[in-house]
Amino acid sequence: DKPLIEIKQLEKYYPIKKGIISRTVGHVKAVDGLNFEIYPGETLALVGESGCGKSTTGRSIVKLDEPTGGQIIFNGRDLSSLNGADLRKARLDLQIIFQDPYSSLNPRKRIGDLLAEALLAHKLASKEEAVKKVDDMLEIVGLTKSHKNRYPHEFSGGQRQRIGIARALILEPKLIVCDEPVSALDVSIQAQILNLLKDLQKKFRLTYLFIAHGLGAVKYISDRIAVMYLGKIVEIGKTEDIFKNPKHPYTQALLNAYPIPNPHFRNRERIVLAGDVPSPANPPKGCSFHTRCPIAKDICRQQTPELLGGSQSIACHFPLN
Ligand code: SF4
Ligand code: MG
């Protein structure tokens, strides 16, 4: 299989301005040279603490953010080279659902209108067809036709996430960026939404980039996991391998934060995260994790480790095994 999407050297830098003439004195490297691909029908999880650049990556993919460097190749074509009808098509194929769908749902519009909006704006359906599609879609996501006459505030968090999913899905996308879609929900509701996402993936052969700050939900939904730290991927591999045998100290620390004890760690030194994430405006030299890494050595403070390896790649001078 060819990848559906390839991310190459993706960068998003924000200038840091100082003084009354707004001189640029440096850059925040929110995303700093990311490389990964996602295959059709696959779920790749992008995991890391807040501020590591995962949302920016997701937003770049759906063109809500403009990267400052690198390429996003979708279906074999560079997104930045598309315009006109090709660009409109790509934008429909690439949808996003958010942590808080409420903030993206206009409170003064009925659900039916919110769902039909994009269909009509893009002339993908007549009015009658749109009504039919909205009815079908509400049922597909576990709501009912009659819900279309209600307003966003009349729904619970879980139902609102179903509406967010319906709004993305109605455009028949190929890839959906799921930006922490269950983080704000009660644990019991989280499982329902994850199940729904899994069912929809099978039914419509969807590809997901699933963004999360922890590894909990990710174990259940993802095929592969990419762990990010300060704008870079530090480890990427199959979900099973990452859980069984995390090789980057940061991945191990994230797994230790996961409430279910991992028997695999019994004979191992537990790595617990100390301190805060350094400012991305002033990342540590060398391996950017060295300020929090319990096994850091001199070379770590000087030399940035490259992401190396085969199906499980690690950016660390002293990977664990
Ligand atoms: Fe820790 Fe060094 Fe590996 Fe960075 S390169 S994670 S500081 S051991
Ligand atoms: Mg975020």
Image (cartoon, helix red, strand yellow):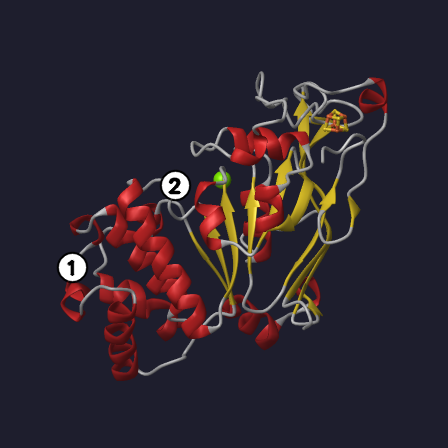
Query: Measured along the vertical axis of the image, is residue 41 above or below residue 187?
Result: below
Q: Residue at x 67, y 47 (%)?
A: 236
Q: In the image as oriented, which residue stretches furthest toward the front? A: 267
Would you say residue 263 is visible in this rendering? yes
Q: Residue at x 56, y 28 (%)?
A: 266
Q: Residues within 10 Å of mark 1 (few under 14, many from 20)?
A: some
The C terminus: image quadrant: top right
Q: Residue at x 72, y 33 (%)?
A: 320
The number of callouts visible is 2
Secondary structure of the residue carrying numbered label 1: loop
In the image, is the residue at mark 2 within 8 Å of ligand 2 by its beta carbon? no
The answer to whether 21 appears left or right of 114 in the picture is: right
Q: Residue at x 35, y 58 (%)?
A: 195
The residue identified by callout 1 is 150
* Of the two numbered discs 2 and 1 in the rendering, the one whose residue sits closer to the viewer: 2
Q: Position of residue 278 (x, y in %)?
A: 63, 22
Q: Position of residue 211 (x, y in %)?
A: 51, 47
- Of residues 174 and 199, which is closer to you in this image? 199
Three-letter residue code for mark 1: Arg
Three-letter residue code for mark 2: Ser
- Of residues 120 and 176, which is closer to you in this image? 176
Which circle marks residue 183 in the picture? 2
Which quadrant of the figure has residue 118?
bottom left
Mark 2 or mark 1: name the one nearer the start of the chain: 1
Would you say residue 49 is visible in this rendering? no
Q: Position of residue 148 (x, y in %)?
A: 19, 66
The answer to whether 207 appears left or right of 203 in the picture is: right
The N terminus: image quadrant: bottom right
Q: Position of residue 225 (x, y in %)?
A: 59, 48
